[in-house]
Image: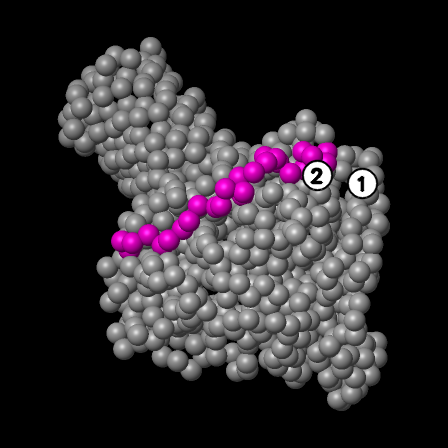
Amino acid sequence: MKSLPLALLFCLLPYAALAHHTAEHSKSMMMGQMGDPSPTPYEAPPPPEAFSGPAHAADIVFDPMTMAEARETLRREQGAKNAYKIMVDRLEARMKEGNDDYLWDGQGWYGGDLNKLWIKTEGEGEFGEDPDEAELQALWSRAINPWFDFQAGARHDFLPGDLDRSYLVVGIQGLAPYFFELDAAAFLSDEGDLTARFEGEYDQLLTQMLILQPRIELNFSAQDVLEIGLGSGLTSVETGLRLRYEFHPEFAPYIGIGYERLIGDTADYARAANEDLGGWRALAGLRAWF
Amino acid sequence: MIENSPFTVGGRTGEAITINGTLPAPLLRMREGDRIHLAVTNKLEEDTSIHWHGFLIPFDMDGVPGLSFPGIRPGQTFHYEFTLRQSGTFWYHSHSGLQEQAGHYGPVIIDPATPDPVQYDREHVMVLSDWAFMSPERIFTQLKQEGGHFNRNNLTLFGLFNRDHNPAQDMSLEERVMWKKMTMDPTDISDVTGAIYTYLVNGHGPQENWTVLFVPGERVRLRFINASAMTVFNVRIPGLPMTVVNADGENVRPVTVGEFQVSVAETYDVIVQPTHANAYTVVAEAVDRSGMGRATLAPRMGMAAAVPPLRPRPLLTMADMGMGGMGSMGGMDHGSMGGMNHGSSSGMSSMSGMNRRKMRNPENAPPDVKVGVGVDMIAPMPKDRTGEPGLGLKNVGHRVLTYRDLVSLKPNKDQRQPSRYVEIHLTGNMERFMWSFDGQKFSSGVEPFRFALDERVRVTLVNDTMMQHPIHLHGHFMELVNGHPGNYPLKHTLNILPGSKLSFNLTADNPGDWAFHCHLLYHMHAGMFNVVTVRPLTRRRRG
C-alpha cells in the first residue's frame, strides 16, 4: 500500500498541464484517471461543424460509385474475414486384450468471429470391419461470450442394422477458466429420447513440444433406450491420458492409455447381452489440424 | 512500379511484392518545401496503394484505398502529387490487404529547408522488418485458428522445476495457476514470432552480415525505421552509446541511451560516434526474444563483431493486466529480474481475488465501449506507463529510452488547452484473435471519430489488452502528453503498453477522412481500425 500515493501521482502527472481547465471538467477526468469505477470521464460530443458534409471526403475528388465499392472492401478487410479450421483431435488405434479397434474424432469449422458452421464427427470399429458406430453433427455455432459458443443443429448416428437415429443438438463449447476445453451437449432423438454428453480436456505442456493431455467424457441418458442398450442416468465414462509430441503444432503423434466403462443399467444390459463392458486400453494415434 | 519479385533470405526464396524490384523499396530522398510528383504503376494482379506514413499532405494523396482514394487497379498508374511541409525520417508502404507483410515498404528522407540542427558526418538508413515464407493470408488464418499458435516459448512443467536457472520460466506454480484461472498467458508477447519470421535489416537476414561503414571519430546518423508487419524491436549497439535526436521524423532534445524499443511504424534517428576502428553489431532483437535482425557498423567491409545471444523472454506482469495501480507489483518486470528474488508474493494478495468476470467489468469503461464477445478484458486500473522503457527492458544494465525522455526540440505550435476530451479503448480477444476500438470491429459499421477543423482535443487511449499496440493516425501528428507541456514530442505512431493508458493532444488541422489504426498488420486486419473525420473540408476566410 505504501506505493499507492506514488502510483496515483504517476497517474495524475500528465494532467498537470490541464490545471487551468474548468474545475468540473478536470475533476471528472481526474476521477476517471484514478480508476474510480463509478463516475464516467467527461466526454463532450463533437461540435456541430464536425458533422458537416460531405459524409465521405474522397467523394468530392473521385467517382462516388467507385469510392463506395472501395469503401465496402475496406470495411470487409478490417474485421470481416472468415476463417476455417479442420481438426483431427483423435485418430487412434486402441489395443486391448482380445481385439484391437480404431477410433476417429474430428471437427471442423468455417465462418466469422460470431457465427460459424461447425461439423463434428466421431466413430469407432474393429480393424478390418465397418464402424460399429459413426456419428456426424452439423451445428450452427454462435459466440455468446469471449470464450464460449452456443451450438445448435442436427446429429445423425450411423448404426448397424436398422438402428440409425437422428437428433436435435443443443450445446456449448469453449474455454473454461484454467484453460479447460469443454464441450457439453444435449441430444433429442427422433424417437423422443433425451441423452447428453460432456467432454473436457486439458493440455499440460511438459516441454514446448511434449504435451500431456488428460481427457474425460461422460454420457448420460434421461430414460432407458432398450434398442441401443442405454439405461437411464450416467451411461458411460471414458477417460484418457495422451502424451503427444508436436513435431509441428499442426502435427502431433501420441501414445496413451485409456479406461472406459459402461455404468449402471447400461452396464447391466450389456452384461445380459454378453457384450464387453469396457476396460483399459493402450492408445496410439495422431492429432493434427490445418 | 509495384510488382511480384522473388526474394531470397537464409538460402530460401519466396515471392515478394516489391517496388522497382527491391526489398525494401528504394530510398526516396526529398526536400522540405518541394512539390513532389510520383507516378506509381501497378504490375500486380490485385489492387495496390502507397501510403506516405507520417506525411502531412492532403487526404486524397494519403493512399488508403476506400478512404482517401479508390486504390490503384492492376495495370493502372496513379499520380501522387503533394508539397512537403515537414522534414525527417519517414517511410511508405502499401495500405491494401496484407501486402505490407510481403515487402511493400520503403524509407523516405526529407531534408530540411533550413540548416539541420542535428550535426552529422555520415548517415545510414536502417529499415527493420519481418519476413515470412508463409503467405500473409495463411498467417492470418492460423492466428484465427489458434491465437497463441506462433508462440514457441510457453511456460512448461519442466520449466517450473528448472525456473531458478531459466528466467523465461521464472514464475511460481501459484502465479501460474492465477494466470490460468483468468485464461491469460504471461508469455503471449508477440502474435507472430521467430517461429516463422526472419528479421531483416534493409532486407538482409542476420546471417548476411550486412555492413555499413564509418570513419572513426565521425558522427554517424542512423535512421531506424520499423517497417515490420508485427514485430516490436529492441535496438542496441553493444559498446556504442546512441544519442536519440529524432522520433517519428520530428527532432527531439538529444538523449543518450544504451538501448531503445521501437514499435511497429515508429522511427528513431540516433547519432553514434565510434572512435575506434572496431566493428560493432547493430542488434534489433524481437521484443519476445524469438529472433533478431543484425547489421554491422565497421570501418571497412568484411569485418564482424560478436553477436550477443538472445536474452531470455520476459514474462508479462500484473501491470500488463491493467492492474498497474494495485499493490507494489506495478513496475515489476520478470524478464530482466537478473538478481532479484522470485518475489511476486507481494502482488499475489491482490491478484488472488481476480477472476475473468472482474477482469472485464464493463463499469471500468465508459458506456460507449461495447463489452461483448470481442472484449476479453477491461483494464481494472490502467496506469500511465510512459515512464517505462518498454516490455522486458527494465534492469538490462544500461539506460533505455522511455516516452518521457522525448522532448520536442521546437515548442509546440498550438499552445491552446484542449477544449474537449475523448477516451478510446483498445480492445481485443486473444483467444479468438479479435481486435477493435471500443469493443467494435471496423467491419461492424462503426461511427467515425469526428473532429471539427482546427479543434484542439485531448485523446486518451486506454489499452484493455495484454498486448502493446502501436496506434497510428494519418495526416496529423499527435502531441504525446508526457510531462513536458509546451514541448510535447510529436508522433505519428504511439505505442501503448499493455494494460496502460496514454494521452495525446491533437489539433485537427488537416481536413478530410483519415485512417486511425493499430499498426500491427493483423490487428488492423482483424478490425482494430477506424476513421477520423475532420470537417468542414475548407477553412472560412477570416477578416
Whether residue A98 is visible to the viewer of this picture, yes or no, is no
Camera-side residue: B454 or A140? Answer: B454
Camera-side residue: B234 or A11? Answer: A11
Residue annotated with mark 1: B78
Determine the residue positioned at 36% across, 73% down: A9
Camera-side residue: B483 or A127? Answer: B483
> Is A55 included in the stretch rendered in magenta?
yes
Determine the residue positioned at 58% across, 63% down: B414
Q: What x and y, as percent, mark residue B89?
A: 72, 64
| Label 2 crowd (10 A; few <14 / some 14-19 / many >=20) | many
Type of amino acid under label 1: Phe
Quarter of the image that includes the N terminus of chain A: bottom left
C-beta proximity under 8 Å, tags 2 and 1: yes
- As drawn, the residue found furthest toward the front would be B543
**Residue A84 higher or lower than B375, as above or below:** above
Type of amino acid under label 2: Phe
Q: What colour scheme has been applied to the protein in the rendered image?
A: one colour
Camera-side residue: B325 or A165? Answer: B325
Residue annotated with mark 2: B69
The chain letter for the residue carrying disc 2 is B
Q: CA distance from mark 2 to mark 1?
A: 10 Å
Determine the residue positioned at 25% across, 35% down: A218
Of labels 2 and 1, earlier in sequence is 2
The range drawn in magenta is A37-62
Q: Secondary structure at mark 1?
A: strand
Q: What x and y, as percent, mark residue A184?
A: 29, 34
Q: What x and y, as percent, mark residue B463?
A: 44, 56
> Is A101 included in the stretch rendered in magenta?
no
